[in-house]
Structures are given as structure tokens and as C-alpha cells.
Image (cartoon, helix red, strand yellow):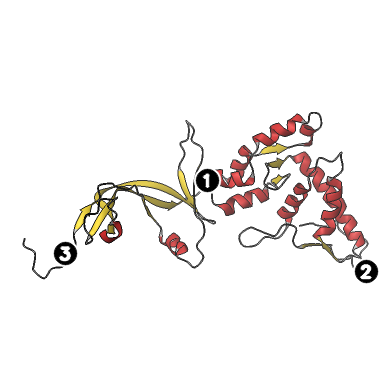
Amino acid sequence: MSTPNNATTCPFSIARQQQHFRLLELPPELADTLTSPNPPTLYFKSSESTAAKPAHAVLCTPTATYRVRQVQTSNTVYLTLPCAQLLSGAAGAESENGVVATATCDSTLELHKAEPTVSAEDYIRQEVTQYDESLYDDDDDDDDTLTASSKTKTQLYSAIPLHHSTIRAALRSLCVFDERAGGPCFLPSARVLLKAWQAMLDAAEDAIAQSARGPIATRSIIEPLARHAQEAESHTPLSLYRAILLRLSASGPDGTTADGAGECRSPPPPSPTSTHPPPRPNNS
């Protein structure tokens, strides 16, 4: 078939040195998110592979997790650039006109919104050392062993193949805490939680007694707990008290709240005709 004389032609060539690319097909909602005025950071993650369960890659936004699947294509797909951008010759362009193929893609990556088969809490329980006072009573060397075996929160966000909102909510629900900012984090045992909760109730009762039954600022509870945490015989870090308060506090739409923000309110005084004592304060 002959080409008309007035037809527009575009010279096409293939570069001698091919580059390596992988095409990623985005779902419409994710494409809209990435083209928004303030696009979020995306993360590729994968769980550890085992003989019984191979690992699968996922792509995580702050609020969603997508399963990544490689799909082979029977069509020839070229990635091209104008030859004018390749005048250096390193990629094999021979002319200033036309386009040059710099890569060939035999497969693409598809994204499918995934429902997690393992909860974030299960991952955390596997990766975080349980904190119990008995482990710190006899041998100080145990501290280093426990610290070395537990991950930091930053490592958990990187290692758990789920989006950050789910991980953040699980950390909060389990009252996971770190003894120092950026250090290894711990999962409090039931005994430690019970002792910490009792200390917080005592601090809340003292704060209520001093507030003339008005609103109780969170700092009124934190300050005596901070003094108690500094005592030599205390093995309850202040960060655990903060984690419990965070667990009980009201949260925003994304499950976050400012650390130490807000206030705890005492219950209303009993009515004049009531013969019962006021109820125990609810610190939620």
C-alpha cells in the first residue's frame, strides 16, 4: 500500500542501549489522589517470605492498601522520547527528527485494593517485645536483650504490609509505647497495664479533689505520674501512661489525636435528693 505524498511521517528508531522500566497501572481513585494539589507519599511494602506463605508486594497510601500483581502482555509496548532529547548519542539516537524507543515493556503491574488477611495487631504482637516488670527486677543485662529484639515504631511502619492508618490505630489500641523517642517499642503485659491503670485512677481522684469538681486538664494527671515514673522502684515509664491516655482519648477522623491534648471531666455532682455517693470517675 503506497503512502500518500501529503502524509505526515515520523522517523522511528530503537536505541542501542535499552533502559529498564516497569509500567504501573493506577486505579482511577488512586490516579485522582496522585494528581490532587497535595498528593500523599506512596510506599511499596512486603511481608517476610516463608516456606508456607510466600510474600506479596503491596502499595500503600496513607489510608488504603493495594495488592500488586504482575501481568504479562502479548503486545509490544515501547517507551519513546523525542530524538532531540537524545542528541548526546548515549542512548543511540542518530537523528534530531522523530522518536526513539528507549525501553520495551513485556509486562505491567496492576493494583487491586486488598483486604488484609492478617490484622495489624497480629503483626505487632509478633514483632514487639512484651514489657513486664519481672523481666527488669533481677538482671540489668536483660534490658539490652529486650531492646535488641524489639522493633521501633518506624521499623513497624516499614515492615507491616498495611497502610499507615491501620498500623497507627493498632499501635494505639494495644497501648504500644517506647521508653525513649525513636527507640524500641514494647507491648505492655496485663499486669503492667493493671498497675498503670490503678496509678492513673489514683492520680485522677487526686486531681478531682483539687479541682472543685470542674474540668480536669490532662496535665493534672500526667504530672504526678511523671514524678512516680522517676522513682527508683518504679518500672512503669511515663510513655506507657501517655499511651493509655491516648487510647482513651477522643480521636479525629483518621484515628489520630494530639499526645496529651484534651481534658478529662469529672462526673456531675449528685442531686440533692440522692443518697448514693458520686460514681467513680470515667477517664475515657
Say which of marks 1 and 3 sits in front. Answer: 3
Q: Earlier in the sequence, mark 1 or mark 3?
A: 3
128 sits left or right of 118 in the view: right
Quadrant of image for the N terminus: bottom left
Query: Can residue 276 be seen in this snapshot?
Result: no
Measure the C-alpha gap from mark 1 to mark 2: 57 Å
Residue 284 in the image, given as x and y percentages of width and height: 76, 57
Can you identify the residue that label 3 sits on?
Answer: 9
Residue 118 in the image, given as x and y percentages of width and height: 54, 43
Can you identify the residue that label 1 sits on?
Answer: 161
Helix, strand or loop for disc 2: loop
The residue sitting at the left extreme is 2
Crowd tier of the residue under label 2, counting other residues whose Cα lies within 10 Å: few below 14, some 14–19, many 20 or above: few
Do labels 1 and 3 touch, CB within 8 Å?
A: no
Q: Amino acid at mark 2?
A: Pro
Task: State the residue in front, 5 or 15.
Answer: 15
Q: Earlier in the sequence, mark 3 or mark 2?
A: 3
Q: Amino acid at mark 3?
A: Thr
Can you identify the residue that label 2 sits on?
Answer: 272
Query: Can residue 155 be seen in this snapshot?
Result: yes
The residue sitting at the bottom extreme is 6
